[in-house]
Image (cartoon, helix red, strand yellow):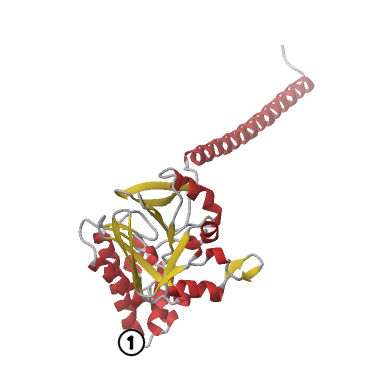
Amino acid sequence: MALSSKAFNDTVEVGANTNQQNKQIGEADMKTIKQLGILLSCLSLSLLATAEEAKKPELGFATTEVAPGIYMLSGVGGFTGGNIGLSIGDDGVVMIDDSMPPLLDKMKAAVKSITNKPVDFLINTHVHGDHTGNNKSMGEDGTRIVAHDNLRINMLVKGLQTAEGKKPMPKAALPVITFSHAMSFHLNGEDARIFHVANAHTDGDAVIHYKNANVIHTGDTFFNGMFPYIDINNGGNVDGYIAAQAKMISVANADTKIIPGHGPLSNVAELKTSLAMLKDSRAIIAKLIKQGKTEQQVIDENPLQKYHKDWNWGFITTEKMTRQVYKSLKQ
């Protein structure tokens, strides 16, 4: 049967409308599918992030027995300050450095996991707050604080930095036993020698050498596998830093366990690698200074580029290392 022209046109129009509707439905479906895809992607990323966060260790301290009765407390899950040393025995407990106030309870819990004895002596390796931050609490608990003369002077002169500005250092936070060159502890079957290394990381650095156990705690005169921080404003200097590491190597041997200020437990081979890097960095920058280069001109040349991959890190970048060596040599 033949269709009239009107009927044919109506049929074509209906077909066209149906195709248009199908196209719109198809577009809507595709839009919905895309939205669902984005939602599922976001959900997957969120679940992945949550899973990664769950796997991340809680901020705190790991304890490692470096030698019989001597322990290293190192941060896990984030920054907890410098590495802490402990000597534990029949004569009591000697601690080296004490982290920062927010970590006080976690630090005490880590110590308690090893011994229930109170800390009798606390040795500060230098003045920085990530190594002396809990001095006040420790002092109030009856711990006697030991440090170099310059560290106590620094605390008295510069005071304590707070949110309200600088305030006098609390009496309980101050060292009550100080030394100028060296002193010894004869406790827990150990002859521990504490000696000053002048103008290295700061002007008040102390290194602790447990002779019998063959263990050295370096404080921040050694950052294991990282460019060091040379605190020029507090008396640090690259030449003093080099001399400090050479001194520590002179009392160490292949079996010495070395607790660095920051980084994993180390040994004399790694300390020698650090010293070689420092000496070479000094020589490279000294040569550029002799050529009359300004600090910025030296920075622009990137003279320590060869050390960037292995030694650069968040706080002391290759540029900052270059600047602090330059400033040290221009003093």
**Where's the N terminus, which quadrant?**
top right
Q: Residue furthest right?
A: 6
Look at the numbered disc 1 and give the secondary structure of its residue: helix
Depth check: 38 or 323 in front? Answer: 323
Q: So how many labels did they put on this image?
A: 1
Depth check: 190 or 233 in front? Answer: 190
Q: Residue furthest left?
A: 254
Residue appearing at x 47%, y 75% in the figure: 234
Q: Which residue is identified by label 1?
A: 290
Residue 170 is left or right of residue 151, and the answer is: right
Residue 299 is left or right of residue 27, and the answer is: left
Residue 238 placement (x, y as % from top left): 36, 76
Residue 3 location, quadrant: top right
Crowd tier of the residue under label 1, counting other residues whose Cα lies within 10 Å: few below 14, some 14–19, many 20 or above: few
Depth check: 173 or 80 in front? Answer: 173
Residue 197 vertical position relative to residue 98 in the rendered view, above or below: below
Residue 5 placement (x, y as % from top left): 77, 22
Q: Amino acid at mark 1?
A: Lys
Q: Would residue 195 be visible to someone looking at this image?
A: no
Residue 172 placement (x, y as % from top left): 55, 63
**Where's the C terminus, which quadrant?**
bottom left
Residue appearing at x 44%, y 80% in the figure: 296
Residue 306 is left or right of residue 2, and the answer is: left
Residue 194 placement (x, y as % from top left): 34, 66
Q: Residue furthest front?
A: 91
Residue 136 vertical position relative to residue 201 in the rendered view, above or below: above
Residue 91 vertical position relative to residue 41 in the rendered view, above or below: below
Residue 170 location, quadrant: bottom right
